[in-house]
Image (cartoon, helix red, strand yellow):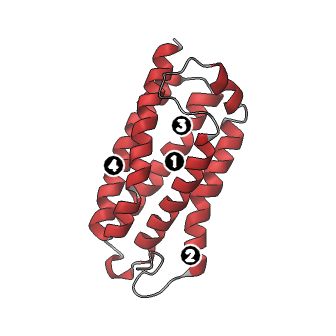
């Protein structure tokens, strides 16, 4: 099985663009919103299940890549062009919420607001996973590790917020 093939073909340029949007967008959000994130994170009181700071960029790069592949699969499928619009809109909203979270949590130090925002983000992401799965099972399944990580991040955000009030 080739996860890059949709309708029997791979559109390399389109695939690259769909991967680069979340990877580059996430990197820019990290640079602009969280340039001192490691330092900020080091000084926060954290729960015992908190991973070391180096884990986050590694995990996010992988997740952004998988998200881009899933979005490509939805976008490249011409058999359901009209029906996929809600899935693509949800994807774009959750991606924007993803990028916003770094600003709330790191740049502006609004940990409680970031918690509310990540709960909304996870809700939209869950709907996105569902819609992707309805259109393309591989795309839906590919989004599941991302949803699991954001669920973990929700718990971590809540714990950090409570420990640092």
Label 1 sits on a secondary structure element that is helix
In the image, 15 versus 149, the foreground residue is 149
Q: Position of residue 18 (x, y in %)?
A: 55, 67
Residue 27 vertical placement versus 137 (above, below)? above
Given the current orientation, which residue lies at the most extreme left position?
134
**What whole-number distance in Å separates the C-alpha atoms at marks 4 and 3?**
17 Å
- Of labels 3 and 2, earlier in sequence is 2
- Of labels 1 and 4, earlier in sequence is 1
**What whole-number distance in Å separates the C-alpha atoms at marks 3 and 2?**
27 Å
Q: Bin the neighbour count of mark 1 within 10 Å (Cα to Cα): few under 14, some 14-19, many 20 and up.
A: some
Q: Position of residue 87 (x, y in %)?
A: 36, 61
User: Is residue 30 among the parts visible in the rendering?
Assistant: yes
Residue at horizontal 30 percent and vertical 69 percent from the top: 135
Q: Quadrant of the N terminus?
A: bottom left
Q: Bin the neighbour count of mark 4 within 10 Å (Cα to Cα): few under 14, some 14-19, many 20 and up.
A: some
Residue 14 bears which disc, if any?
Answer: 2
Given the current orientation, which residue lies at the most extreme top position?
165
Q: Which residue is disc 1 drawn over?
A: 96
Q: Is residue 57 left or right of residue 114?
A: right
Q: Which residue is disc 3 drawn over?
A: 101
Q: Nearer the viewer, mark 3 or mark 1?
A: 3
Residue 28 vertical placement versus 12 (above, below)? above
Q: Which residue is disc 4 drawn over?
A: 126
Label 3 sits on a secondary structure element that is helix
Label 4 sits on a secondary structure element that is helix
Q: Is residue 20 left or right of residue 32?
A: left
User: Is residue 84 among the parts visible in the rendering?
Assistant: no
Residue at horizontal 66 percent and vertical 42 percent from the top: 30
**What whole-number distance in Å separates the C-alpha atoms at marks 4 and 2?**
25 Å
Please report contact status of discs 4 and 3: CB closer than 8 Å, yes or no. Answer: no
- Of labels 4 and 2, earlier in sequence is 2
């Amino acid at each position: 099985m080739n996860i890059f093939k949709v309708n029997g073909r791979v559109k390399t340029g389109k695939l690259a663009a769909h991967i680069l949007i979340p990877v580059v967008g996430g990197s820019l959000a990290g640079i602009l919103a969280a340039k001192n994130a490691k330092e900020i994170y080091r000084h926060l009181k954290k729960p015992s299940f908190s991973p070391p700071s180096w884990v986050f960029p590694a995990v996010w790069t992988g997740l952004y890549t998988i998200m881009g592949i899933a979005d490509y699969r939805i976008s490249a499928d011409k058999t359901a062009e009209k029906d996929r619009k809600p899935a693509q809109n949800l994807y774009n909203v959750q991606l924007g919420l993803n990028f916003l979270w770094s600003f709330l949590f790191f740049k502006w130090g609004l940990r409680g607001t970031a918690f509310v925002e990540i709960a909304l983000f996870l809700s939209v992401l869950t709907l996105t996973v569902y819609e992707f799965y309805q259109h393309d099972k591989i795309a839906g399944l590919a989004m599941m590790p991302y949803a699991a990580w954001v669920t973990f991040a929700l718990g971590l955000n809540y714990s950090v917020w409570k420990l640092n009030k």
